[in-house]
Image: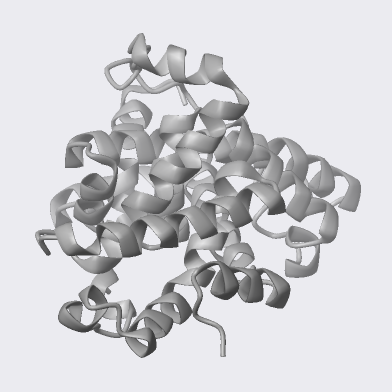
Amino acid sequence: MDRQDCQHLLAALGEYIDGTLDEELCREIEKHMAECENCRVVVDTLRKTIYLYRVEAQEESLPQEVRHRLLARLELEG
Amino acid sequence: MNESEKFPSFSLEALRRRDRQEMSRLVEAFSGVVYRLGMKMLGDPQDAEDVLQSTFLKVFEALPTFEGRSSLSTWIYRIAMNEALMILRRRRPEVGLALEEGNDEDDEPLSKPQALVDWCCLPENELLSGEARRVLDEAIRKLPEKLRTVFILRDIEGLSTEETAEALGLSETNVKTRLLRARLRLREMLSEYYGERVKESGLYG
């Protein structure tokens, strides 16, 4: 991650991953990644990081007893 | 998908006159996400339950003054985040002080990624093992508060940049910068753990 191109990629990475970067810049990034293994790894592991947090969070559910206590506190049971 | 489209729509008029059925619908729709936000922010079930209860008490109390400038969901996220931050500051008062001093690093250059092991090849059951989940939770709690709030709303809850900016009272540019910083830091922390797993598995090199 020492080259000038890598630094450019880093700054645009957020928008690239979110798919909001303009097309021309995307093409530049993809061209750079084809030649730069380090940047490819950073992009892939960054995407995977976000993915893992999403998957993990989807599995977190509200425990029944917590739900009951909430409804009781709000006087909404029954 | 826009955040407001993920939730059913509600009658503000019915909520304001404290219609029990409409209030129950609102609680059913949002209690899961508010609890999750509390867990991710504070990492403790009791604290998360406190966030959950105080958020809904505030929501119902403040509904008469809700002007509908932001969507109802964004407004609820904002209240929930404020409740979580309040508990955090009560627990660690020095955090609040540090924030007020404005130790803002938004303008600092991004630090270069250090970890360069490709761990994407690890099987899913290893990426999401019990131990890995603990690493994920620990990493998110190590993020500075202002990065954690943005990461939770944008990447975990799936709010748009605009909605996150509204919920946290930040500019969209700040949301984008902080989100990238949060993602890069988490990537470094996860890479430490998963990088070791890759080396153990012999998949590396």
Does residue A75 sit above or below B162 in this rendering? below
Q: How is the image coloured?
A: one colour
**Residue at (45% x, 44% y) in the render:** B83
**Whether residue B192 is visible:** yes
Question: Which x, y percent locates residue B105?
Answer: 35, 17
* Residue B36: x %, y % from top left: 56, 60
Q: Nearer the viewer, residue B98 or B90?
A: B90
B9, A71: nearer the viewer: A71
Q: How many marks?
A: 0
Drawn side of residue B87 relative to residue B170, left or right: right
- Residue B159 visible at all: no
Residue B25 vertical position relative to residue B57 in the rendered view, above or below? below
B7 vs B95, left or right, is: left
| Place of residue B46 in the rendered image (x, y in percent of width and height, measured from the top left) | 70, 51
Q: Which quadrant does the N terminus of chain B fall into?
A: bottom left
As drawn, which residue projects farthest toward the top?
B101
Q: Position of residue B52 (x, y in %)?
A: 53, 59
With respect to residue B139, does B128 lie above or below? below
Which residue appears at 30% of the width and 33% of the height? A11
Q: Residue at x 56, y 61 (%)?
A: B35
Position of the C terminus of chain B by quadrant: top right
Tell me which corner region of the image, top left, top right, bottom left or bottom right, holds residue A3: top left
Between B149 and A29, the one lying in front of the other is B149
